């Protein structure tokens, strides 16, 4: 055990602190020293939370995918032929409608990205507004609103796709394949609705004239979540299309 | 998004914002604690009813009347579920983790206080749903805490499998969402809100344990949520994910082709990490307390961290050892068996290090220390039967016997609860500003320790002798009748042990109001929560942000003015 002397850095004693303190503290370097961390730290924290959230949603879909694959390969006993058969079944998906929905969602992801960059620029320039003689253009195209509309469009499109499926005679309990089609699209839609609620919240804070930094954080996190939703839908669509 | 900064500028004054819908992690931690305390009494009462019924099967009990076999299975189901989810998962992580993680890393609150509040109240709603299952037509479900289909997936499979089972599954699903919110908050807080100087390798082992538990929760609860959705669909929408062709009371149901094993895989992919979600925080607090009361640095700090990480990692790869009975391929069984055995390595490292910490120490035998030692004892006793069950050939013999009940109660149930007791006695002064009664704490400890062993050790003998579990009566089978004296002994031990818990509760509430006032650092500990006022102010450090210069367990420092160095002490010997 190390001996304590006035010249020995105490952080070399004990068992937990055998490294000197980094110059900027823990791994943060920005939060401490004030009960109000700066905007950059808040943004980073929100993004970190989002990464955790994405990991969770990913686990939900990973487990559903594994269930999909396992259920697809399960044999079931057929009394008529006295043998084991696969009962996975087929589903005639409304390809055109789903493709249009996919395009809608991808476009919404692009508009969302424009909205994210717009508000990031405005947040960066906000301090300049206090300088006399400098005026910043406040009005910009409502990319956020367009994204929300496209998001609603996607959900309506999914609803129509369900209607078309029912029209073709494929219900949730028709066969395991159709069960998974309804399940995966529904779970994705629920998560996407969460994204729409976040965007609406951002719009409300905009109407309430909250500080732009806070709004930027909401929009930034919502944007990354939205992109994830688009990628997730493409994955779900690919699963339904290619692993039938 | 509301982060710690935006909501933490001013302490709320109104009663509702301060104590009910509080955003303060300390209040939320106490709310979780009392929720778990309520749940543990409900769960314990159910186990008492079961134990009484086992030795007096025809007894008519107050409130419940005569216990029928299906009632017994309901009690079994609800006891297991309430204990696993609302006690073992809720108190160590949601309760103590919520209260002390931010303080121990030098933060003013959790990263997302609003989410934190939502997490607690969502858990509360889940608990209400769970209890509601008792009061609906048919009563509580009888499919066990593991909810195996087809029993759990068919509404007509038995009493309690109607609305009661729907409420049960919904409650679990809500609980999953709450736990995911909590895990997200714990991870972000730990990674992003540590004070200056608080490197990862300076974090107390308690923080490490909550951090790793949060990772496990983040990856495991989503899987259970998915599994629960599929189960609800099978029950209510006519799908066949889990249900094969089933005939109930001569009626052929519409399901076909589903696999109950699919549920088992998904459930145990969550279920085994859940064991570590329950026990890891207990390991953390035990390490903290053993070091503090041994007045020695924790033996092998880094090894302890890596051992916890190893346990967490391996915990995701062994779910199949719960399914040896399912007819799995011997090759799969071999792989699961081998990986399960591997968990013994980090577990042994931890045990060795705990003993190394206490070796040749001037131990202060206060109540928290007694419970920490009790935790180690139970961890070893319960853990040693793990390698038996990890071997398929033995598990097939022992799986449906009391051997398994004894094993998991010792390692996952009571060891974790001893961790909670240790944490309560240790942190009570900081949480409530007063000391708990030491004498009654010791009385409580010795009765509980002896009682615990008296209840659960005989279960191993019962299991080896072929004593089957989950049966409501053993009086009708000749060879099981011969085991009844052991059951009687366990029931008497359970009655005494449960009675002793009144000592704890009375001590808890009495001390809360009448206990002697506690100083800021009554145990002479080194971590950050002991550097602030008792109880801590709203922002934890009274406007001061701590700067960390030391590791968490610098005790017995030769030549130092006192036998410990606080984490915030100056970096050179000029301290004090």
Image (tube, helix red, strand yellow):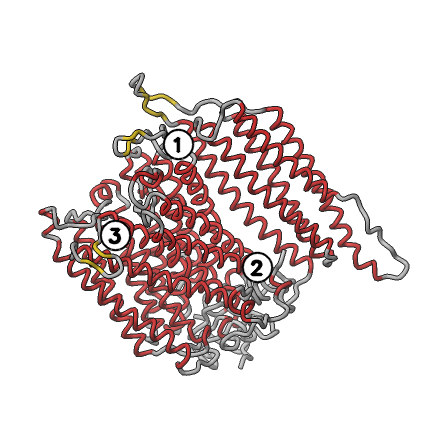
Q: Chain of mark 2?
A: B
Q: Chain of mark 3?
A: B
Residue B114, numbered circle: 2
Q: Nearer the viewer, mark 1 or mark 3?
A: 1
Q: Nearer the viewer, mark 2 or mark 1?
A: 1
Seen in the picture, residue A35 relative to A104 is either above or below; the reply is below
Measured from the top left, where is residue B85 in percent x and y?
39, 54
Q: Give the SS element for disc 1.
A: loop
In the rendered image, the residue lying farthest to the right is A133
Q: Chain of mark 1?
A: B
Instruction: Have a look at marks 2 and 1 and say if they share a chain.
Output: yes
Q: CA distance from mark 2 to mark 3?
A: 39 Å
Q: Give the SS element for disc 2.
A: helix
Q: Is residue A161 left or right of residue B183?
A: right
Instruction: Have a look at marks 2 and 3 and say if they share a chain.
Output: yes
Q: Residues within 10 Å of mark 1 (few under 14, many from 20)?
A: many
Question: Mark 1 — residue?
Answer: B240
Measured from the top left, where is residue A193 in percent x and y?
59, 43
Residue A20 visible, this orientation: no
């Amino acid at each position: 055990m190390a001996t304590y002397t006035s010249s020995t850095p105490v952080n070399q004693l004990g068992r937990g602190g055998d490294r000197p303190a980094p110059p900027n503290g823990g791994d943060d370097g920005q939060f401490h020293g004030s009960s109000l961390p700066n905007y950059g730290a808040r943004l980073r924290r929100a993004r970190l939370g989002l990464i955790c959230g994405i990991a969770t949603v990913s686990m939900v879909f990973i487990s559903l995918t594994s269930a999909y694959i396992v259920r697809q390969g399960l044999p079931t006993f057929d009394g008529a032929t006295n043998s084991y058969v696969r009962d996975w079944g087929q589903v005639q998906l409304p390809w055109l409608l789903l493709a249009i929905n996919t395009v809608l969602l991808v476009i919404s992801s692009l508009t969302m990205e424009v909205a994210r960059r717009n508000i990031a620029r405005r947040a960066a320039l906000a301090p300049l507004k206090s300088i006399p003689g400098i005026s910043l253009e406040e009005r910009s195209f409502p990319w956020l609103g367009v994204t929300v509309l496209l998001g609603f469009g996607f959900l309506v499109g999914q609803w129509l796709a369900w209607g078309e499926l029912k029209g073709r005679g494929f219900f949730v309990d028709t066969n395991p394949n159709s069960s998974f089609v309804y399940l995966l699209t529904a779970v994705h839609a629920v998560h996407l609705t969460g994204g729409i609620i976040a965007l609406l919240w951002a719009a409300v804070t905009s109407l309430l004239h909250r500080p732009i930094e806070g709004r930027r954080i909401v929009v930034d996190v919502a944007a990354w979540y939205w992109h994830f939703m688009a990628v997730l839908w493409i994955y779900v669509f690919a699963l339904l299309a290619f692993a039938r | 998004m509301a982060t710690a900064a935006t909501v933490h500028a001013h302490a709320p004054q109104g009663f509702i914002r301060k104590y009910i819908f509080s955003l303060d992690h300390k209040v939320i931690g106490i709310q979780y604690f009392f929720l778990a305390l309520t749940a543990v009494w409900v769960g314990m009462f159910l186990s008492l009813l079961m134990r009484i019924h086992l030795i007096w099967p025809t007894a008519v009990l107050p409130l419940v009347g005569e216990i029928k076999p299906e009632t017994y299975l309901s009690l079994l189901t609800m006891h297991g579920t309430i204990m696993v989810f609302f006690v073992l998962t809720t108190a160590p992580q949601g309760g103590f983790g919520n209260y002390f993680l931010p303080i121990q890393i030098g933060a003013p609150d959790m990263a997302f206080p609003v989410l934190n509040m939502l997490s607690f109240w969502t858990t509360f709603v889940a608990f209400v749903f769970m209890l509601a299952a008792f009061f609906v037509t048919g009563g509580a479900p009888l499919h066990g805490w593991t909810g195996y289909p087809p029993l759990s997936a068919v509404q007509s499979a038995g009493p309690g499998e109607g609305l009661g089972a729907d409420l049960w599954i919904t409650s679990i699903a809500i609980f999953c969402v709450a736990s995911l919110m909590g895990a997200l908050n714990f991870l972000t807080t730990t990674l992003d809100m540590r004070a200056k100087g608080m490197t990862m390798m300076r974090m107390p082992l308690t923080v490490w344990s909550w951090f790793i538990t949060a990772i496990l929760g983040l990856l495991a609860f989503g899987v259970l949520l998915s599994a629960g959705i599929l189960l609800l669909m099978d029950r209510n929408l006519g799908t066949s994910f889990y249900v094969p062709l089933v005939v109930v009371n001569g009626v052929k149901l519409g399901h076909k082709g589903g696999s109950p094993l699919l549920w088992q895989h998904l459930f145990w992919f969550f279920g085994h990490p859940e064991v570590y979600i329950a026990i890891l925080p207990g390991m953390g607090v035990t390490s903290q307390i053993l070091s503090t009361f041994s007045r020695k640095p924790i033996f092998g700090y880094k090894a302890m961290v890596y051992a916890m990480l190893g346990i967490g990692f391996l915990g995701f790869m062994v779910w199949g050892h719960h399914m040896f009975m399912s007819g799995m391929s011997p090759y799969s069984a071999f792989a699961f068996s081998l990986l399960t055995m591997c968990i013994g390595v980090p577990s042994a490292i931890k045990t060795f290090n705990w003993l190394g910490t206490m070796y040749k120490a001037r131990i202060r035998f206060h109540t928290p220390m007694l419970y920490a030692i009790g935790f180690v004892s139970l961890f070893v006793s319960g853990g040693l039967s793990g390698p038996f069950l990890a071997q398929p050939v033995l598990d097939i013999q022992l799986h449906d016997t009391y051997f398994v009940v004894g094993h998991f109660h010792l390692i996952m149930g009571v060891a974790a609860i001893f961790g909670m007791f240790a944490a309560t006695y240790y942190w009570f002064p900081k949480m409530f500003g007063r000391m708990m009664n030491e004498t009654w704490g010791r009385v409580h400890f010795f009765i509980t320790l002896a009682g615990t062993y008296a209840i659960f050790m005989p279960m191993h003998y019962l299991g080896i002798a072929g004593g089957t579990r989950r049966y409501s009566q053993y009086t009708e089978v000749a060879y099981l009748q011969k085991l009844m004296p052991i059951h009687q002994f366990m029931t008497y031990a359970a009655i005494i042990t449960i009675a002793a818990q009144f000592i704890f509760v009375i001590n808890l509430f009495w001390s809360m109001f009448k206990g002697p006032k506690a100083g800021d650092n009554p145990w002479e500990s080194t971590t950050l929560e002991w550097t602030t006022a008792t109880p801590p102010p709203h922002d934890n450090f009274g406007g001061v942000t701590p700067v960390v210069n030391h590791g968490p367990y610098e005790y017995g420092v030769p030549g130092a003015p006192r036998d410990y160095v606080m984490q915030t002490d100056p970096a050179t010997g000029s301290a004090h």
